[in-house]
Image: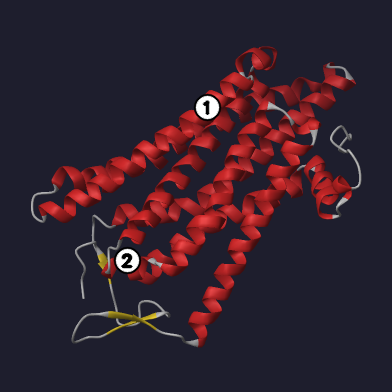
Amino acid sequence: MEEETGFYVGSDFHPCYEINNVSKTLRRTSSTICTSLYVFLGLLSVITILGNLLVIISIIYFKQLHTPSNYLIVSLAVTDLLVGVVVFPLSVSFSLSYCLHYRSLFCKIRDSFDVILSTTSIFNLSCISVDRYYAVCQPLMYRTKINNSVVLAMIVMSWGVSVVIAIGFVIAELNQEKCQVNCFFDLVLEKILAPVFSFYLPVIIMLYIYLRIFLVAQKQACSIESTRKSGESASKTERKATKTLAIVMGVFLMCWFPFFLCFSFQLLGGVSVPVYETLNWLTLSNSMLNPFIYAFFYSWFRSAFRAIVSGKIFQGDLTRTKLH
């Protein structure tokens, strides 16, 4: 059958549900595949929570990591942590397949958290790209342009705008339920304007900024031989930090772009629910991947993680320990 949402729904559209073809009602099943899926998603949730807790605790505990750049990373980690704590469990209990049939209060809550946290993630990454731009392209102005007050304003803006977008998204959805027929403005707001302002526009801006950073970094690499060894070390550090954060954004795009592309294609025709559901879980998995990226590329994060996991931070005051 073809739903008004633009999704094509088949009789075997989800391993944990089945549809009664006569009454068109949905009921849960307890198949082996369904149980395995829930165990796998539960494991992803636990890994996401523990990984991002390590990032947050590391930056808060160790004085060496108290920098404006890392405060932005804390904001991103808090976003990812909430995905593991809230969105994963809600999405398991009230999946997309379930919510296509029953638009319950919990489905709306799940959608709201999805929009808020995904938009906050992309805005945090946008702020991080700005931070990297000043660190690499205008290093002499970095400390004046990027300080704790500016970073706090960036974080508040990222969360505040995300909440506003989520409220607009939910209002548009509620209005569509009421008006039934003439919902053109609400449809445009939900299907076009929301993804443009919460994803496509910020991504274009970030790609432009990282392109500028790449070009400047190339020029610095060409002139590095004429600098002192300390300057070379500092330049390498900045380039490595920029490369790492660019990888964070690249992984974000690989996880999120297919979902938003599929979301946009709803306007052109039916989208298979299994495809959309899979892409939705791919987006959530991004929150699990970021801590591993930090641990792999940043030696000081690896040192901090080892100190926390081994329990050394409980054996004495290591807050001023030099991380390598």
34 on left or right of 129: left
The image shows residue 139, relative to residue 89, as above or below, that is above
Q: At 46% from the left edge and 68% from the top edge, which residue is drawn? A: 92
108 vs 75, left or right, is left
Residue 169 falls in which quadrant of the image?
A: top left
Q: In the drawing, what numbered circle is on residue 285?
A: none
Q: Residues within 10 Å of mark 2 (few under 14, many from 20)?
A: some
Residue 70 x %, y %: 68, 33
Residue hosting label 2: 99
Could you say which is closer to the camera, residue 191 or residue 133? 191
Q: Residues within 10 Å of mark 1 (few under 14, many from 20)?
A: some
Q: Give the structural element (helix, strand or loop) at label 2.
A: helix
Closer to the camera in the image, 57 or 249: 57
- In the figure, 199 relative to 272: above or below? above
Instruction: Please say if 272 is above or below 228.
Output: below
Secondary element type, mark 1? helix
